[in-house]
Image (tube, helix red, strand yellow):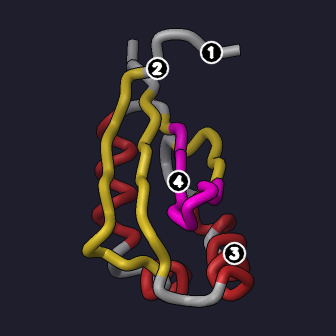
Amino acid sequence: MTTPVLEIAEFRTSVETADFVAAAEAITPWLAAQPGFRARRLAEIEDGAWIDCVEWDDIESAKSAADRIMGSEAAAAFMAGIDFSSLSMRHARIVTSL
Protein backbone atom coordinates (compact mmCIF):
# COMPACT_ATOMS: atom_id res chain seq x y z
CA MET A 1 0.00 0.00 0.00
CA THR A 2 1.30 3.45 -0.89
CA THR A 3 1.27 6.41 1.47
CA PRO A 4 -0.17 9.64 0.01
CA VAL A 5 1.88 12.79 0.46
CA LEU A 6 1.48 16.55 0.29
CA GLU A 7 4.15 18.49 -1.52
CA ILE A 8 4.28 21.90 0.15
CA ALA A 9 6.21 24.67 -1.57
CA GLU A 10 6.42 28.16 -0.09
CA PHE A 11 7.99 30.95 -2.12
CA ARG A 12 7.79 34.51 -3.34
CA THR A 13 7.18 35.51 -6.93
CA SER A 14 9.14 37.77 -9.22
CA VAL A 15 6.22 38.76 -11.47
CA GLU A 16 2.85 40.48 -11.14
CA THR A 17 0.16 38.49 -9.33
CA ALA A 18 -2.20 38.27 -12.31
CA ASP A 19 0.59 36.97 -14.55
CA PHE A 20 1.64 34.41 -11.95
CA VAL A 21 -1.91 33.15 -11.41
CA ALA A 22 -2.40 32.81 -15.17
CA ALA A 23 0.84 30.82 -15.43
CA ALA A 24 -0.21 28.64 -12.48
CA GLU A 25 -3.56 27.89 -14.09
CA ALA A 26 -1.88 27.14 -17.42
CA ILE A 27 0.11 24.23 -15.95
CA THR A 28 -2.98 22.56 -14.47
CA PRO A 29 -3.41 20.17 -17.44
CA TRP A 30 0.27 19.20 -17.22
CA LEU A 31 0.02 18.52 -13.47
CA ALA A 32 -3.24 16.60 -13.82
CA ALA A 33 -1.62 14.32 -16.40
CA GLN A 34 1.26 13.33 -14.09
CA PRO A 35 1.17 9.82 -12.63
CA GLY A 36 0.04 9.89 -9.02
CA PHE A 37 -1.44 13.41 -9.10
CA ARG A 38 -4.48 13.86 -6.85
CA ALA A 39 -5.14 17.56 -6.22
CA ARG A 40 -3.57 21.00 -6.03
CA ARG A 41 -4.18 24.18 -4.05
CA LEU A 42 -2.32 27.45 -4.63
CA ALA A 43 -2.72 30.16 -2.01
CA GLU A 44 -1.36 33.64 -1.43
CA ILE A 45 -0.31 34.54 2.11
CA GLU A 46 -1.03 38.00 3.56
CA ASP A 47 2.67 38.93 3.40
CA GLY A 48 2.82 38.25 -0.35
CA ALA A 49 4.37 34.79 -0.18
CA TRP A 50 2.69 31.82 -1.87
CA ILE A 51 2.00 28.24 -0.87
CA ASP A 52 1.55 25.59 -3.55
CA CYS A 53 0.22 22.31 -2.10
CA VAL A 54 0.03 19.30 -4.37
CA GLU A 55 -1.33 15.96 -3.22
CA TRP A 56 0.28 12.83 -4.67
CA ASP A 57 -0.37 9.10 -4.37
CA ASP A 58 3.14 8.61 -2.96
CA ILE A 59 6.54 10.25 -2.56
CA GLU A 60 7.87 8.60 -5.70
CA SER A 61 5.19 10.27 -7.82
CA ALA A 62 5.92 13.64 -6.22
CA LYS A 63 9.66 13.41 -6.80
CA SER A 64 9.27 12.14 -10.34
CA ALA A 65 6.98 15.04 -11.28
CA ALA A 66 9.37 17.52 -9.63
CA ASP A 67 12.19 16.20 -11.81
CA ARG A 68 10.07 16.54 -14.96
CA ILE A 69 8.57 19.97 -14.28
CA MET A 70 11.93 21.73 -14.57
CA GLY A 71 12.18 20.68 -18.21
CA SER A 72 8.53 21.12 -19.09
CA GLU A 73 7.70 23.78 -21.65
CA ALA A 74 4.15 23.88 -20.23
CA ALA A 75 5.53 24.94 -16.86
CA ALA A 76 8.15 27.42 -18.09
CA ALA A 77 6.17 30.61 -17.36
CA PHE A 78 5.14 29.36 -13.91
CA MET A 79 8.68 28.36 -12.99
CA ALA A 80 10.06 31.67 -14.31
CA GLY A 81 7.74 33.53 -11.93
CA ILE A 82 9.17 31.89 -8.81
CA ASP A 83 11.92 33.59 -6.83
CA PHE A 84 13.98 30.43 -6.23
CA SER A 85 16.08 32.11 -3.54
CA SER A 86 12.92 32.14 -1.39
CA LEU A 87 11.76 28.59 -2.20
CA SER A 88 11.18 26.10 0.60
CA MET A 89 9.82 22.68 -0.37
CA ARG A 90 8.79 19.83 1.90
CA HIS A 91 6.85 16.60 1.66
CA ALA A 92 4.45 15.45 4.36
CA ARG A 93 2.85 12.05 4.81
CA ILE A 94 -0.94 12.38 4.88
CA VAL A 95 -2.28 10.65 7.97
CA THR A 96 -5.95 11.64 7.70
CA SER A 97 -8.12 13.41 5.16
CA LEU A 98 -11.75 14.34 4.70
What segment carries the magenta color? Answer: 43-55
In the picture shown, does residue 20 fall above or below 90? below
SS assignment for the magenta stretch, majority: strand
Residues tagged 2 and 4 counted as in contact (Cβ below 8 A):
no
Tell me the quarter of the image containing the C terminus. top right
Farthest residue to the front: give it: 47
Q: Earlier in the sequence, mark 1 or mark 3?
A: 3
| 23 versus 94 height, above or below | below
Q: How many residues crowd around disc 4 within 10 Å: few (fewer than 14), some, or many (20 or more)?
A: some
Asked whether residue 50 is drawn in magenta, I would say yes
Residue 97, labelled with which disc? 1
Is residue 87 visible in this depiction of the protein?
yes
Q: Separation of disc 1 and disc 4 at Cα?
A: 19 Å
Q: Is residue 75 above or below residue 66?
A: below
Q: Nearer the viewer, mark 3 or mark 2?
A: 3
Secondary structure under the numbered disc 1 in the rendered image: loop
Gap in angstroms between the C-alphas marked 1 and 3: 27 Å
Mark 2 highlights which residue? 94
Secondary structure of residue under mark 4: strand
Q: Earlier in the sequence, mark 3 or mark 2?
A: 3
In the rendered structure, which disc, 4 or 3, sits on the residue that comes first in sequence? 3
Q: Nearer the viewer, mark 1 or mark 4?
A: 4
Q: Residue at x 48, y 32 (%)?
A: 57
Q: Residues within 10 Å of mark 3 (few under 14, many from 20)?
A: some
Report crowding for label 2: few under 14, some 14 to 19, many 20 or more residues within 10 A (C-alpha): some
- Earlier in the chain: of badge 2 and badge 4, it is 4
Q: Where residue 75 appears, x then y in whole percent?
A: 51, 79
Front position among marks 1 and 3: 3
Mark 3 highlights which residue?
A: 21
